[in-house]
Image (cartoon, rainbow, N blue to C red):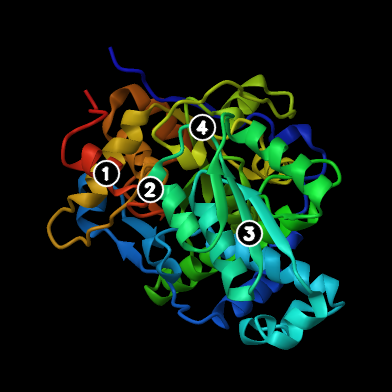
Amino acid sequence: MRKEIEWIGNSMMPISKQKTTVEFLGKQEIDKAKKFHMSCPGYEKTPLQSLNNLAQLLGVAGVYVKDESYRFGLNAFKVLGGSYAMARYMAQRLQKDISELPFEKIISQEIKDQLGDVTFATATDGNHGRGVAWTARKLGQKSIVYMPKGSTIRRLENIRAEGAEAKITDYNYDDTVRMIAEESDRKGWVIVQDTAWKGYEDIPTWIMQGYGTMAAEALEQLNDMGIHKPTHIFIQAGVGSLAGAVQGYFASVFEEERPKTVIVESDQADCFYKSAKAGDGKPRIVGGDMTTIMAGLACGEPNSIGWNVLRDYSEMFMSCPDWVSARGMRILGNPLGSDCKVVSGESGSVTIGALSMLMQDEHLKAAREALGLNKDSRILLFSTEGDTDPDKYRSIVWDGECPSY
């Protein structure tokens, strides 16, 4: 018997008398990040695919998927956060505004001479670490990357190919973060992590602002299609930095008219779903091995900054078994009619899988109605990675691993 999707509406919004400010994710701040990314060689907006035939099948007005497999040739969105945070760190060290340090200048020998040697360190399932390693190599600096147990050798090799010193630990993601944070304190490394804790908030904030480039691009692309805003956004959450960035940007731009947002997690690492279910406004932690194909979402401890944003602005939280992600991979990889194919990895596809079930499974009718999903709905989703583990991708899409039924 298969495990089913669980969902809960957000009853926590009234708890905070005053909502968390999202000004730090507003247009002014995100424009800074976007301008920095535009200065990077190889920058292009990643495609926003309008899947019209899928929308018709699901009974909605539009389904739009931001395809991050094209980002800087790295097959995932994560480099947006790491690169911007590292640039902001260097700007802070130099007592300059980031607007004074486009990519060409920040990688110059002049800047390297001023800063000396810097070692950037991070814990990652793969995509974030590869982005940090890529940026460090461009900067002429060193990177150290620790990966949680269960990480694939292919992702480890991709990180090492960017020049990083990388290894797979015997710990889960959250314990690996603690491990590298402790080593960074002892050895003077600069930790670049997209989760926040007491005393470590600047870099996670900058990472979230870097992710905002993707949200800003998506809105521009929708506007180019003649669409003022989506009615709904489905966004996946690991520690919640990406989800918080997307939610915060759209909440800042549209305020009370913001799209309805659904936070989607793996049921093995559903800390936000469990936090919402508790209903007291306090974050909950999920421990253990968190065995899921959605490696990029296998994080059990919420980013405190992201949690505050998602608690105060999201409409629904969903906890999804692996088959939902696998279904999403197959849907995107086998398009209907003239719809474009999207190669989406395990952590990139769970939202489309969840949306398809919401619209087609009568057991989820109450959730569908609670969100007001109907023939007028225009839904924005983010495929955050391509086939970063090609063997796993083929096992799911070609060979039927994790069947829906």
2 and 3 marks in contact (CB < 8 Å): no
Q: Nearer the viewer, mark 2 or mark 1?
A: 2
**Above or below — where is 337 with respect to 14?**
below
Please report whichever mark, 1 or 4, sits nearer to the chain's N-terminal start: 4
Q: Which residue is mark 1?
A: 391
Report the residue at 59% width, 59% height from top.
250
- How far is mark 1 from mark 4, CA to CA? 18 Å
Looking at the picture, does residue 198 appear above or below residue 142?
A: above
Looking at the image, do the residues carrying marks 1 and 3 touch, with CB atoms under 8 Å apart?
A: no
**Do the residues bearing badges 2 and 1 touch, measured as CB atoms within 8 Å?**
yes
Q: Residue 154, labelled with which disc? A: 2
6 on left or right of 99: left
Callout 4, which amino acid?
Lys
Mark 3 = which residue? 143
Between 90 and 56, the residue placed more toward the observer is 90
Q: Which residue is mark 4?
A: 149
Place of residue 262 in the rendered image (x, y in percent of width and height, measured from the top left): 50, 41
Q: Is residue 319 visible?
A: yes
Residue type (three-letter) at the residue carrying disc 2: Arg
